[in-house]
Amino acid sequence: MKILAIDPGLSTGWAVWFSESDRIESGVQAFRARRGESPGMRYLYFRTWLDRILNRIKPDLIVYEMSHHRGGAATQIQIGLTSRIEEICSILKTDYMKVHSGEVKKFITGSGKAKKQAMITAANKIFQNQKRSPERDIISDDEADAICILAWAINEFEDQKK
């Protein structure tokens, strides 16, 4: 099984778990419109990136952080990106589910209101426990969130198998 976790935003964190090798790959991709471009270009950039990563990885499941309706540009962008995730998953007939950030934080740290540094620390522990993952530190909170979403999803999937 392959699970792709996404923390959608202008800087989108992503992490994928390859169950057959128990390996995690992760990273961050930026989707900022360039000077003179329509702000809607970020959605086209995101869609192109998502198409490429889905074609390369061919995940069985995509899990992403659900949008919080706090208002402002960040919420609007996250809603736009999550809409594209759902759209392409529907086209490709790929399963997807969303998870609230508070649920992931509580699962990972014990507190649903964990700060960014606590999530980065937790992600580094998860990443370092994967023997086949590259040796490096996670420093981006976006990548850390994606790794933590992935850990939550693996746990949920394993619970369903039992």
Image (spheres, helix red, strand yellow):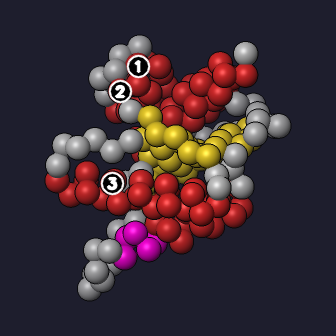
Residues rendered magenta in the picture: 41-45
Q: Earlier in the sequence, mark 3 or mark 1?
A: 3
Q: Disc 3 and disc 1: Cα gap in Å?
A: 23 Å
Contact? badges 2 and 3 (CB < 8 Å): no
Contact? badges 3 and 1 (CB < 8 Å): no
Query: On the image, numbered disc 3 is attached to which residue?
Result: 79
Q: Is residue 115 visible?
A: yes
In-front residue for pair 97/75: 97
Residue 57 % position (x, y):
71, 55
Contact? badges 2 and 1 (CB < 8 Å): yes
Question: Mark 2 belongs to which amino acid?
Answer: Gly
Point out the image quarter for the N terminus: top right
Q: Which mark identifies residue 102? A: 2
Tell me if 37 is positioned left or right of 124 in this view: left
Q: Which mark identifies residue 106? A: 1
Residue 38 % position (x, y):
28, 80
Element marked by disc 3: helix
Q: Count neighbours of disc 1 (C-alpha within 10 A) and say few if under 14, some if 14 to 19, many if 20 or more.
A: some
Residue 134 % position (x, y):
69, 42
In-front residue for pair 10/81: 81
